[in-house]
Amino acid sequence: MKIILMLILPLFVLTSCTTFEAKRAENEEYIKDGKCTLHNVELVNEVQEIAYGLPLIPSKYTEYHYKYFPNYEPFIMGGCFYSESFPKEKSTKVCPKCKEAYLILKAEIEKE
């Protein structure tokens, strides 16, 4: 049983990490000509924290993300593995209105 678990667990972790990357690529349909297609606002540069590992993301976050704030994420996914030499921050483009919507809904999203 331990051997089966040791074989399945890494597969699950790798699958989860690639799922986050696929979701990030979906955001491209919400950007056109450097603007958020939901709010029709120019994207701006923002330095964000890079999160490594496999964070627990509330189900409401996924439910609300593409509906209310498709061009804002509270952090950047850095992958499943971490080393002290990895970067801790990265500049990314965000929609100010999406960020505002996230901050308004944050308490409700984390209420699980």
Image: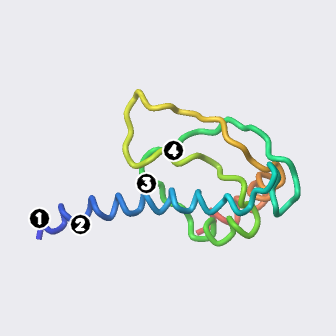
- For the image shown, how many numbered marks are present on the structure? 4
Marks 4/3: CA distance?
8 Å
Query: Which percent across, then down, holds residue 5?
Result: 19, 66
Figure check: 85 above or below 102: above
Query: Which percent across, then down, holds residue 46?
Result: 72, 38
Q: Earlier in the sequence, mark 2 or mark 4?
A: 2
Q: Which residue is mark 3?
A: 54
Residue type pointed to by label 4 = Ala
Q: Which residue is mark 4?
A: 51
Residue 45 or residue 54, whichever sits in front: 45
The answer to the question of whether label 1 and label 3 lie on touching residues, with beta carbons closer than 8 A, is no
Residue drawn where x is 40% and y is 29% of the image: 84
The answer to the question of whether label 2 and label 3 lie on touching residues, with beta carbons closer than 8 A, is no
Q: How is the image coloured?
A: rainbow
The answer to the question of whether label 2 and label 1 lie on touching residues, with beta carbons closer than 8 A, is no
Q: Which residue is mark 2?
A: 8
The answer to the question of whether label 1 and label 4 lie on touching residues, with beta carbons closer than 8 A, is no
Front: mark 2 or 3: 2
Q: Earlier in the sequence, mark 2 or mark 1?
A: 1
Residue 103 or residue 88, whichever sits in front: 88
Marks 2/4: CA distance?
24 Å
Q: Residues within 10 Å of mark 1 (few under 14, many from 20)?
A: few
Marks 1/3: CA distance?
22 Å
Q: Earlier in the sequence, mark 1 or mark 3?
A: 1
Residue 39 or residue 73, whichever sits in front: 39
User: Quarter of the image holding residue 82?
Assistant: top left
Q: Residues within 10 Å of mark 3 (few under 14, many from 20)?
A: some
Residue drawn where x is 71% and y is 60% of the image: 70
Q: Which residue is mark 1?
A: 3
Q: Residues within 10 Å of mark 4 (few under 14, many from 20)?
A: some
Q: Earlier in the sequence, mark 2 or mark 3?
A: 2
Residue type pointed to by label 2 = Ile
